[in-house]
Amino acid sequence: MTAAPPPFAVISGSQVQRALHGREKQVVELVEATYRLHGAGHSVNPPSYFLRFPDRPSSRIIALPASLGGQVRVDGIKWISSFPENVAAGIPRASAVLILNDHDTGYPFACLESSIISATRTAASAALGADRLTQGRARPTRVGFVGTGLIARYIHTFLTGTGWSFDEIGVFDLAAGSAAGFSGHLERSGVAGRITVHDSVEELVRSSDLVVFATVASSPHVHDVSWFAHAPVVLHVSLRDLAPEVLLAATNVVDDVEHCLKVGTSPHLVEQLTGNRDFLDGTLDDVLTGRLTVAPDRPVVFSPFGLGVLDLAVGKYVYDEVVRAGDLQVVDDFFHDLSRHG
Ligand SMILES: NC(=O)c1ccc[n+]([C@@H]2O[C@H](COP(=O)([O-])OP(=O)(O)OC[C@H]3O[C@@H](n4cnc5c(N)ncnc54)[C@H](O)[C@@H]3O)[C@@H](O)[C@H]2O)c1
């Protein structure tokens, strides 16, 4: 058998955005299919590796290697930086690349701008969670966003792009400029519903049936269980906002147990406090496959760690779209000196 290395392509952020624009429903279906593949064991998704810096303690770069089986059959790695101080300098906190590797030869065949892919798969996962975790209860008409940066914007886009509409949209951010920027975006996008900038997280939580946490909080700042007495569904995307007592009074759903119970996430804090995992009710895949039904009279907290397999699935979707559109930009001679003995 002779195999030729695949061509190596570079896919820019504008190509990624074009490939994903208006595809919210397809991407949510893709993310659901990927969770199901992962749940059925057709993936390899080792722990993420966190590179931290003593001289820049608030920053990190995370490596997410993964392998996806099923029909997709692709391997790869996302390498994503989080530099929160970037925001004050006027550029996004997160930046990333995704490398896709060929299933048969292992050769990398594409490098994709991946902050958009990452935000997209995160938002698609949140929208899927919102849909499935609200089954069996009145469909929320009041949504609230705590932390209103880029991820909040993508989640809102994915909620509306998959059929949600809200009578009330609550907004809270520690930075008034972020709250104003997000509200301005909502107004410009022409959403129906009243937009309210709240003065406190408490006010927002109490007046929302669907609550999205997308802050950069590094430790819990929400402790009061009584704020959740009306049993909202909480998309805890930023993972570290809620104190253990809030989780202990809720139904807890994660994307992957081993991933989520690490690196000081709120579920990890609960495990450290209680010494066990009894507080976990299951994974989103358990909900998708009907193994778990969530009670309508208890708050639900979905804590998605964010899986590399989702980046691979969305990245491969983008790659295929770019190929289909005839826009693939290949780097000629990227792999060179291919004759073993010269
Ligand atoms: N779980 C996942 O799969 C996943 C994937 C991507 C991003 N994330 C997380 O989503 C979060 C948001 O990312 P982003 O790119 O939108 O960041 P961003 O910096 O653009 O926005 C974060 C916002 O949160 C605000 N904030 C910080 N602390 C707050 C608090 N205590 N209360 C209210 N607001 C607060 C900041 O002022 C800022 O406006 C990050 O924590 C990131 O790690 C999670």
Image (tube, grey):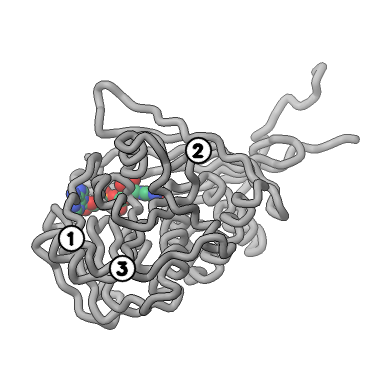
Q: Mark 3 points at which residue?
A: 210
Amino acid, disc 1: Ser
User: Looking at mark 3, is its residue's CB closer than 8 Å to ligand 1?
Assistant: no
Q: Which of 96 and 179 is in front in this view?
A: 179
Q: Which mark is residue 64?
A: 2
Amino acid, disc 2: Leu
Give coordinates of residue 31: x percent, y percent.
54, 59
Mark 3 Cα-neighbour bin, 10 Å: few <14, some 14–19, many ≥20: many
- Report the residue at 36% width, 38% height from top: 271
Dividing the picture into quadrants, the one containing residue 196 is bottom left
Q: Can residue 291 be seen in this view?
A: yes
Q: Residue 226 carries which label?
A: 1
- Vertical arrangement, residue 176 with respect to residue 21, above or below: above
Dividing the picture into quadrants, the one containing residue 103 is top right
Q: Nearer the viewer, residue 214 or 90?
A: 214
Which numbered disc, 2 or 3, marks the residue closer to the eye? Answer: 3
Task: Report helix, strand or loop for mark 2.
Answer: strand
Give coordinates of residue 21: x percent, y percent.
47, 67
- Vertical arrangement, residue 82 with respect to residue 197, above or below: above
If you read the primary sequence from the N terminus, does the residue marked by circle 1 or circle 3 appear first?
Answer: 3
Amino acid, disc 3: Leu
